[in-house]
Image (tube, rainbow, N blue to C red):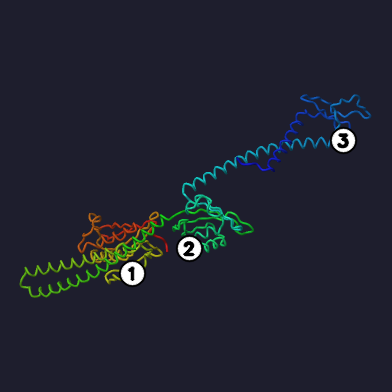
């Protein structure tokens, strides 16, 4: 139980004496007044009974005979003081009792709040620290000590103790950032760094703090928590190493595929050339001519498949990045420039988070229109908002897609040419959660709609 201070006990004794005096005064019954002049009254003091005194003034030159001993002549100003004192004392007691109740309630709420905070910190295994900036005295909670392998209260309560446990490679940065925070006037100190435990192990921690006391405009006290994030950091490092290894493996595979594909394409080019020469000499042999045509078509298919393999292997190799949509589309338009088609790009100030092969998406859409639109002369790019999403529109004025084929045109191998263009588009977009569908009216032109989720688009 908390020990009461001497001042508190003295105040309580004085309060009790005043209350007792007032109770005694209150028991000495009501006031009856009889004035013998304008400056005095007669008070009758009785116990548990009242005596009525006529308050009419006595005739002039009257003499009170046999004045009762219980009558006391008191000046009016004294009577007023006594009455005022009694009234004030009563009000003071009421206020004191009410204040005491409020104080008890506040203390109870404070204890509950402290208990909740203590349990929350214990549950999260976070260490609590409290630093008096002016004196350099610091407090480190038992959980803080245990986090670093020490017994409770083993770490000396000084600011220097905290500094000495920071990893030497991080110490200068951490102290510099702390000083910058204290002088910047910003709210919230937040930093991650390495510390050395009692056993010499390297731990990763995350510290948060807030200045809670100021003196003469200068920070005087800061309180915060420290969290051990070693396991999480090790998992992140392992994941980064794994991603780096995967990227390196993909890079090597890309090199191998590029070299091998290049060599195969050279051989196929030679085969195609020889087929042309043989065809010229086999015009009189229809059977041989048909065989040469088949060999040529097979060679072309092999070329397309190798190119698709090279493109598909690039998907997801690099991390998605924010890209300006108008810039990407314009690059695709320039690379597919055609005198037969007019392009209109009505997109600006929009960025999307997508795979680095996003340009290939719009390149293939334009290529698909040039090959299969049936004479389209215009191609239009635009976008609109739908809730929190945006919808990117790519449309032409050609023949369009029949209703029964809208769901199959994105499947691998479907189509009059290689059958890989639209399939590759959907795969690239799916890397960051985007989707594509065809919504045009057959006979009025093709209309592709790309849905971009809220977290993967922004205004630039």
Kindly report which numbered mark, 2 or 3, lies closer to the viewer in this rendering: 2
- Closer to the chain start, of discs 1 and 3, is 3
- Closer to the chain start, of discs 2 and 3, is 3
Q: Nearer the viewer, residue 240 or 99?
A: 240
Q: Which of the 4 image quarters holds residue 310?
A: bottom left
Question: Residue most toward the front?
Answer: 199
Q: Quadrant of the N terminus?
A: top right
Alpha carbon distance from label 2 to label 1: 45 Å
Q: Is residue 262 left or right of residue 213?
A: left
The residue shown at (52%, 62%) is 177
Residue receiving disc 2: 170
Q: Is residue 274 left or right of residue 446?
A: left
Kindly report which numbered mark, 1 or 3, lies closer to the viewer in this rendering: 3
Residue receiving disc 3: 39
Circle 2 Cα neighbour tier, 10 Å, few/some/many (<14 / 14–19 / ≥20): few
The residue shown at (46%, 59%) is 194
Q: Could you say whether the residue bearing mark 3 is in a helix, strand or loop?
A: loop
**Percent of width and height locating residue 181:** 54, 61
Q: Which of the 4 image quarters holds residue 21?
A: top right
Kindly report which numbered mark, 2 or 1, lies closer to the viewer in this rendering: 2
Circle 3 Cα neighbour tier, 10 Å, few/some/many (<14 / 14–19 / ≥20): few
Residue receiving disc 1: 331
Q: Quadrant of the C terminus?
A: bottom left
**Percent of width and height locating residue 152:** 51, 50
Q: Is residue 11 left or right of residue 2?
A: right
């Amino acid at each position: 139980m908390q020990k009461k201070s001497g001042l508190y006990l003295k105040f309580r004794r004085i309060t009790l004496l005043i209350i007792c005096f007032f109770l005694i005064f209150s028991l000495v019954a009501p006031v009856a007044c009889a004035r013998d002049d304008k400056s005095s009254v007669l008070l009758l003091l009785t116990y548990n009974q009242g005596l009525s005194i006529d308050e009419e003034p006595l005739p002039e030159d009257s003499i009170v005979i046999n004045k009762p001993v219980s009558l006391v002549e008191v000046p009016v100003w004294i009577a007023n003081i006594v009455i005022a004192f009694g009234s004030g004392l009563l009000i003071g007691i009421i206020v004191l009792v009410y204040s005491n109740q409020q104080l008890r309630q506040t203390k109870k709420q404070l204890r509950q709040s402290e208990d909740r905070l203590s349990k929350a910190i214990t549950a999260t295994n976070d260490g609590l620290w409290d630093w008096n900036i002016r004196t350099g005295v610091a407090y480190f909670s038992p959980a803080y000590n245990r986090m670093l392998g020490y017994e409770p209260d083993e770490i000396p309560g000084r600011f220097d103790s905290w500094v000495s446990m920071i990893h030497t490679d991080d110490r200068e940065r951490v102290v510099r950032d702390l000083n910058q925070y204290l002088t910047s006037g910003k709210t919230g100190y937040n930093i991650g760094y390495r510390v050395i435990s009692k056993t010499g192990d390297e731990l990763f921690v995350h510290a948060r703090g807030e200045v809670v006391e100021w003196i003469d405009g200068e920070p005087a006290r800061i309180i915060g928590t420290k969290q051990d994030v070693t396991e999480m950091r090790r998992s992140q490092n392992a994941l980064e190493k794994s991603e780096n290894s995967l990227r390196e493996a993909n890079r090597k595979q890309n090199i191998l595929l590029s070299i091998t594909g290049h060599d195969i394409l050279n051989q196929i080019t030679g085969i195609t050339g020889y087929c042309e020469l043989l065809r010229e000499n086999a015009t009189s042999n229809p059977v041989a001519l048909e065989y040469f045509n088949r060999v040529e078509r097979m060679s072309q298919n092999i070329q397309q498949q190798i190119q698709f393999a090279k493109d598909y292997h690039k998907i997801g190799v690099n991390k998605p990045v924010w890209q300006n949509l108008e810039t990407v589309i314009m690059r695709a338009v320039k690379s597919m420039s055609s005198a037969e088609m007019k392009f209109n790009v009505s997109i600006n100030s929009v960025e999307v988070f997508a795979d680095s092969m996003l340009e290939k998406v719009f390149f293939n859409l334009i290529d698909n229109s040039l090959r299969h639109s049936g004479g389209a002369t215009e191609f239009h790019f635009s976008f609109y908002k739908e809730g929190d999403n945006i919808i990117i529109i790519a449309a032409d004025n050609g023949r369009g897609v029949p209703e029964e084929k809208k769901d199959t045109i994105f499947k691998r191998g479907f189509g009059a040419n290689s059958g890989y263009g639209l399939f590759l588009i959907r795969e690239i977009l799916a890397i960051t959660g985007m989707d594509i569908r065809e919504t045009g009216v057959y006979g009025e032109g093709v209309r592709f709609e790309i849905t971009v989720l809220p977290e993967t688009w922004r205004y630039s």
